[in-house]
Amino acid sequence: MSSDTGRKQFWKRNAAKMPGSIQHVYGAQHPPFDPLLHGTLSKTVQKMPTTPVKLKKVSTFQEFESNTSDAWDVGEDDDELLAMAAENLNTEVVMETANKVIQNHTKLQEQNKYQEIQQLEDRPVRLEELPSYINSDFKIVKSASESQIPNPSGEKHFLQRQQSVPYQPSAAPVGKSNDPASLSTAGLSEREAFRLEKFIQLLAGPNTDLDELRRLSWSGIPKPVRSITWKLLSGYLPANVERRDGTLKRKQKEYFAFIEQYYNSRNDEANQSTYRQIQIDIPRMSPETLILQPVVTEIFERILFIWAIRHPASGYVQGINDLVTPFFVVFIGDHVAEEEEVENVDVSSLPEEVLRNIEADSYWCMSKLLDGIQDNYTFAQPGIQKKVKMLEELVSRIDEQVHRHLHQYEVEYLQFAFRWMNNLLMREVPLRCTIRLWDTYQSEPEGFSHFHLYVCAAFLVRWRKEILDEKDFHAY
């Protein structure tokens, strides 16, 4: 009886709490009610009394529905709906119907997928037409997250994510990565191939996440995507992929406008000493086999002279010439074979348009770098003086023994650290190591101006044994 009473109480309503007749709500598919067209319908609608009337207890759904009929859209199917509502559905029938719906839906999905695969197999597809979510083994993966990951057994498998969305890059990264052959994972270890794929997916999106790109770049950038990554992290290229081509063309055009405007003044009396110093410094750079090529020498002379003219606060200072080399070598690497050493490539064999683009890109990226450390090259070079002092204080805290040893033998930090700050270690380590180091510098928001200080300190700590064993520093 308690259950019957509860059931009755569920349907019980107090008419006094009802605000009045519930009006019809029409959507786009149902026009507003027209009494001329629906005259018979208006007769069947029961109006609520204007004064509250206490309703009798209702014990069945049909009685409840009849007392509140204005809450329902009245139509031709009312009798059928009420009959269905009154009918008790069999559980087995419900389950059987549900299973049939699921099976039909699954079959339909499989048929659609099979048709898509058949279309791919029937049409000859060129390699450059394949999107990034089809890997080199021509296996279709469902999303960008389904990259190949290493397996202890040596087999390749895919990391899949639920509710995956097909990854369709809107544009390929600028540079060598426009050529799918340049992004081949042949010859790479599984770890290297996996990292390269992560970079490709990130760079090909409509808006590159620069924070994520920095995180990936900190431990090194794969060579095929290093050029585009450096341009993005240096602030030369925008994160939006649709704006990149336009930005490149505009900045390259702007650079050669500077050439036309300023370069002819290199032999003027006011600029002659600057240009002469640039000519003296370039042959001292490394790698010599690359720098001493006439076409490369001319490119570096233009880059350095234009930068000096446009930055009169500092002008040209020895050391700036070394900062062009990493950018130039990385951008040249986009246009040479994988097995060919950039240092030995014949630059004059490259198309003129390619060389013009490399020259402009090197100028702007070097300018972006120097914007953050320009006080290193202004009068008296206060930026370097400050950083050398900071290095001394840092080493005194992290390795007091090395610090005391240097002072004991009257070795001033400025004697060896000035060049470290002025040339950013370009003269201390091989070029390939500098490029790898700059991968991390680029990923740090203040890599060249702040993080470089800690790298220099790490050098002293790394070779502390050799430093402590040395007694005669004047021989160096």
Image: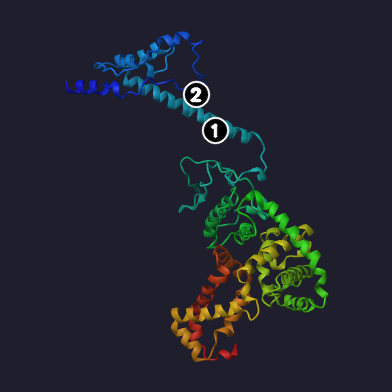
Quadrant location of the N terminus?
A: top left
The quarter of the displayed image where residue 282 is located: bottom right
Q: For the point 81% across and 64% down, which residue is it?
A: 260
Question: In front: 178, or 416?
Answer: 416
Side (left or right) of 322 relative to 271:
left
Q: For the point 50% across and 89% down, which residue is it?
A: 407
Residue 471 visible, this angle: yes
Mark 1 element type:
helix
Percent of width and height locating residue 65: 33, 16
Q: Is residue 209 above or below residue 65?
A: below
Q: Residue furthest left?
A: 1
At label 1, which amino acid type do we have? Lys
Query: Disc 2 designates what residue?
Result: 27
Percent of width and height locating residue 396: 46, 82
For label 1, the crowd category at 10 Å Cα-Cα, with few meaning under 14, some 14 to 19 and many 20 or more, is few
User: Disc 1 or disc 2, which is closer to the eye?
Assistant: 2
Q: Is residue 198 above or below residue 389?
A: above
The tag on residue 113 is: 1
Disc 1 to disc 2, C-alpha distance: 36 Å
Q: Is residue 316 above or below residue 60?
A: below
For label 2, the crowd category at 10 Å Cα-Cα, with few meaning under 14, some 14 to 19 and many 20 or more, is few
